[in-house]
Image: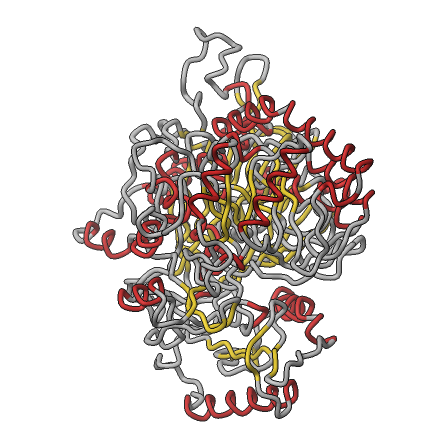
């Protein structure tokens, strides 16, 4: 792709101090004239109307400083008349962050078949109230670039180009500001950190960022390789939305015929898997439960679902445009529909993936991309030194018994990479896209590290975080995604949980045993069996006949309780939550957008609330009011599970991608946001129920996205009672902290299986020094409260727990610091 240097800006520019000095040469005059056209209005009579038509309704934060058009230079351009041109916008922030946003053009003659922007999630995720635009920006003139840059190979190469196919900016808090009278050690300035030098190359399009250094005479300069480069390997791609109804010279597949073929394929797969057995339900691993009491057996092809998905995506990353005699194959298999076992995924807009290469030329150490059961440092997935066979996959899934040292998708994701090196310091990239994403990593030795990102849908939206140190970087990231919510003190203590404490007597006995042994704990948890038939916000009246008295008895002795509340709603006409949600039209719809989606989870047939809707989130928050959640008290808090979302009979135990939210947006666009929005609505409910009392909420969530630090705690999901899972807990939690999720933990003892006394003790000792400290167990596991392993081992576990409580003031101080600075708690 090339940037059109004659493009005009289509947004208001608010940076009055962006000026050019008097031109000294004809070359500079040409260069500055070209840049001015990009930074100013076109001057036409209808500019204001055109601006209004082109504004992206979803974007938040500072307006773009620079805009341009990207032209497709591929010899096999699939759309005629420039319909595949893209809009480039560069947003510069006062703290040095640069936002690079590339979208389809719309509302113009050279339009795609769509008159509106692709849906994006700024409003839901970004902390745009803290995102301030840069005001001190200087255009680095062409003849000054040589003086500014020393030993910079990229610029030396471009200086030989008489077309001046690049634009360079310097920005930061002290650009153009006289610093002579200020204290050199002024901590309120990032002058010592260096300003940012950003260069956009036009042909072919690429972007490079440096941090400036001060010379002896206090002038800024850049040296060596960039701290981060975008599209330097020319792997960027953006698949334009298409429609079968567009009048383009190509064959059209009849919809009825395609549906008949899809139905026939699904019936064939169903017969192969289930024969003539009647399915009456599904288990948590996605396998069927039959009417005769048997269960579907796990087969090898099911185990390898991750590899199959990754292999398909790698094809997209490696294969060039699918052409036939130079013409694009409009009806290639998978263009409009894909099949996954008995499931089908319709794609009414065709393929819509976006991707690019992002390199760290000075660094061989990169971290981030949670959540994976692997090392904290990201290992190669491609190239000669590849440790993994497949790219890192970012797609929130309910993974049953996940594997270790794999790139497979798990319960949540943060698309953030942080690079660290002696020469370039700390730098980060935040790929702001909540659709399914794959990332390849390849180390290049002294040439740094390359990454290649590809997302199924959305737009190209990349934030470059210049650092230069961890504290600066996490302050920048906090301004983008929000700051950690300071947890209540009790939540930093020990939590005791299992699936399930049977009844009120069981709860009292466990509590009294902790008291008898003087074993410190703060919270006792109840899993799904405490409800009336998996109807959340209810109690089983036989097992928990007086929940308020139970909570009061524990609260009087300084303890809290937590109950589980999942997002799937039992489809029972007599269940008040389902009845009201149906009447108000709050559920996610099927692919037609007309019917409420019906999937299978713990209650059986279930529907799922649309948490992308503010109206639905407000309604959900109201359900935590004491007059709605009967039997709840102020000492009862909440656990959000199964919020990837988990659908036992769905593809990969999740939702079909072509389902619709209440605004008609496909599930593929916002899949990875479901967990964070569910936790957000729950946290708001716990605040609202005590409105005016300033009582902090506590909500634990299994699924997450960037920004989840604002709403509560996260845990690593359904781990296993094994030494391997104990070992991987620390790097998994460190990776989550690199993603700014500080309040995180792994189930002490492992969820599945039965730990022996030594493993349980060692896990208790490790968990005492991890941010979220909870013991938990599957319902098939033996009871494993600390005293179940004998006095000798119980004393050792108690000693570890006591050490945790001795350090609570320190823990609380670390969390307070994180809530202000954004710095991770676990490092």
In this rendering, the answer to whether 75 lies above or below 752 is below
Indicate the quadrant where residue 494 lies. Answer: top right
Q: Position of residue 428 (x, y in %)?
A: 57, 39
Which residue occupies 19% across, 50% down? 48
Q: Position of residue 101 (x, y in %)?
A: 43, 50
In this rendering, the answer to whether 356 lies above or below 726 is below
Q: Is residue 401 left or right of residue 254?
A: right
Q: Is residue 618 left or right of residue 666?
A: left
Q: Is residue 245 left or right of residue 334?
A: left
Q: Position of residue 490 (x, y in %)?
A: 53, 32
Indicate the quadrant where residue 609 lies. Answer: bottom left
Which residue occupies 50% across, 63% down? 73
Q: 390 or 795, which is in the foreground?
A: 795
Q: Position of residue 514 (x, y in %)?
A: 64, 36
Residue 798 appears in the figure: yes
Q: Quadrant of the C terminus?
A: top right
Q: 436 or 776, which is in the foreground?
A: 776
Residue furthest to the left: 45
Q: Is residue 122 left or right of residue 529?
A: left
Q: 59 or 640, which is in the foreground?
A: 640
Indicate the quadrant where residue 221 lies. Answer: top right
Which residue occupies 78% across, 51% down? 722
Task: Please tell me how many numbered marks the rendered image carries.
Answer: 0
Q: 410 or 287, which is in the foreground?
A: 287
Which residue occupies 58% across, 87% down? 278
Residue 71 appears in the figure: no
Give the image's coloring scheme: secondary structure
């Amino acid at each position: 792709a090339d940037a059109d240097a004659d493009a005009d800006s289509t947004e208001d520019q608010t940076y009055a101090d962006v000026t050019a000095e008097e031109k000294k040469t004809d070359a500079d005059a040409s260069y500055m004239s070209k840049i001015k056209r990009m930074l100013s209005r076109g001057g036409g009579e209808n500019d204001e109307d055109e601006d209004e038509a082109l504004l992206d309704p979803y974007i938040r934060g500072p307006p773009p400083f620079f805009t341009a058009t990207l032209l497709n230079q591929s010899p096999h351009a699939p759309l005629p008349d420039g319909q595949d041109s893209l809009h480039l916008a560069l947003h510069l922030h006062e703290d040095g962050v640069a936002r690079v946003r590339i979208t389809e053009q719309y509302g113009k003659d050279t339009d795609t078949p769509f008159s509106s922007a692709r849906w994006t999630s700024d409003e839901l995720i970004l902390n745009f109230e803290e995102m301030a635009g840069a005001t001190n920006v200087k255009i680095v003139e062409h003849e000054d670039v040589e003086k500014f840059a020393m030993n910079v190979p990229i610029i030396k190469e471009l200086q030989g180009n008489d077309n001046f196919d690049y634009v360079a900016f310097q920005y930061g808090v002290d650009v153009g500001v006289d610093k002579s009278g200020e204290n050199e050690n002024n901590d309120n300035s990032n002058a010592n950190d260096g300003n940012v030098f950003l260069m956009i190359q036009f042909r072919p399009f690429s972007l490079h960022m440096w941090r400036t250094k001060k010379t002896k005479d206090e002038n800024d300069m850049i040296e060596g390789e960039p701290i981060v480069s975008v599209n330097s390997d020319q792997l960027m791609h953006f698949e334009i939305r298409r429609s079968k109804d567009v009048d383009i010279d190509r064959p059209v597949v009849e919809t009825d015929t395609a549906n008949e073929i899809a139905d026939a394929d699904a019936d064939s797969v169903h017969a192969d898997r289930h024969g003539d057995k009647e399915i009456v339900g599904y288990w948590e691993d996605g396998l069927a439960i039959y009417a005769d009491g048997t269960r579907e057996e796990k087969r090898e092809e099911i185990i390898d679902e991750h590899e199959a998905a990754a292999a398909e995506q790698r094809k997209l990353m490696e294969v060039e445009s699918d052409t036939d005699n130079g013409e694009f194959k409009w009806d290639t298999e998978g263009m409009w529909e894909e099949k996954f076992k008995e499931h089908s995924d319709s794609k009414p807009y065709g393929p819509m993936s976006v991707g690019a290469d992002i390199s760290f030329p000075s660094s061989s150490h990169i971290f981030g991309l949670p959540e994976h059961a692997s090392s904290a440092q990201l290992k190669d997935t491609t190239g000669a030194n590849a440790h993994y066979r497949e790219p890192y996959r970012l797609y929130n899934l309910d993974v049953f018994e996940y594997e270790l040292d794999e790139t497979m998708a798990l319960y949540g994701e943060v698309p953030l990479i942080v690079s660290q090196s002696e020469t370039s310091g700390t730098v980060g990239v935040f790929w702001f896209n909540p659709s399914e994403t794959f990332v390849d990593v390849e180390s290049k030795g002294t040439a740094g590290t390359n990454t290649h990102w590809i997302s199924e849908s959305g737009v190209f939206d990349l934030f470059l975080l210049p650092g230069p140190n961890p504290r600066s970087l996490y302050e920048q990231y906090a301004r983008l995604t929000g700051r950690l919510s300071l947890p209540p003190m009790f939540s930093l203590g020990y939590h005791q949980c299992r699936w399930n404490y049977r009844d009120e007597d069981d709860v009292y006995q466990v509590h009294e045993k902790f008291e008898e042994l003087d074993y410190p704990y703060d919270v006792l948890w109840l899993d799904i069996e405490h409800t009336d038939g998996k109807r959340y916000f209810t109690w089983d009246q036989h097992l928990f006949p007086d929940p308020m008295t139970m909570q009061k008895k524990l609260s009087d002795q300084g303890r809290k309780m937590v109950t589980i509340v999942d997002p799937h709603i039992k489809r029972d006409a007599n269940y008040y939550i389902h009845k009201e949600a149906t009447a108000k039209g709050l559920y996610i719809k099927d692919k037609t957008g007309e019917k409420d989606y019906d999937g299978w989870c713990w209650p059986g047939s279930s529907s799922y609330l649309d948490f992308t809707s503010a109206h639905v989130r407000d309604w959900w928050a109201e359900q935590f009011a004491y007059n709605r959640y009967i039997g709840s008290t102020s000492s009862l808090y909440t656990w959000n599970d199964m919020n990837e979302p988990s659908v036992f009979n769905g593809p990969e135990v999740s939702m079909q991608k072509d389902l619709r939210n209440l605004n008609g947006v496909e599930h593929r666009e916002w899949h990875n946001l479901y967990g964070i929005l569910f936790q957000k609505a729950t946290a708001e409910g716990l605040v609202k129920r005590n409105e005016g009392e300033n009582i902090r909420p506590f909500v634990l969530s299994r699924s997450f996205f960037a920004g989840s630090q604002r709403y509560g705690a996260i845990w690593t999901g359904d781990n296993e009672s094994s030494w391997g899972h104990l070992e991987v807990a620390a790097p998994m939690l460190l990776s989550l902290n690199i993603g700014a999720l500080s309040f995180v933990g792994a189930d002490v003892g492992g969820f599945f299986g039965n730990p022996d006394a030594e493993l349980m003790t060692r896990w208790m000792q490790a968990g005492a020094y991890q941010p979220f400290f909870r013991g938990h167990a599957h319902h098939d596991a033996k009871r494993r409260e600390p005293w179940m392993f004998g006095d000798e081992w119980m004393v050792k576990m108690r000693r570890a727990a006591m050490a945790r409580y001795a350090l609570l003031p320190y823990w609380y101080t670390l969390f307070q610091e994180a809530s202000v600075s954004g710095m991770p708690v676990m490092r």
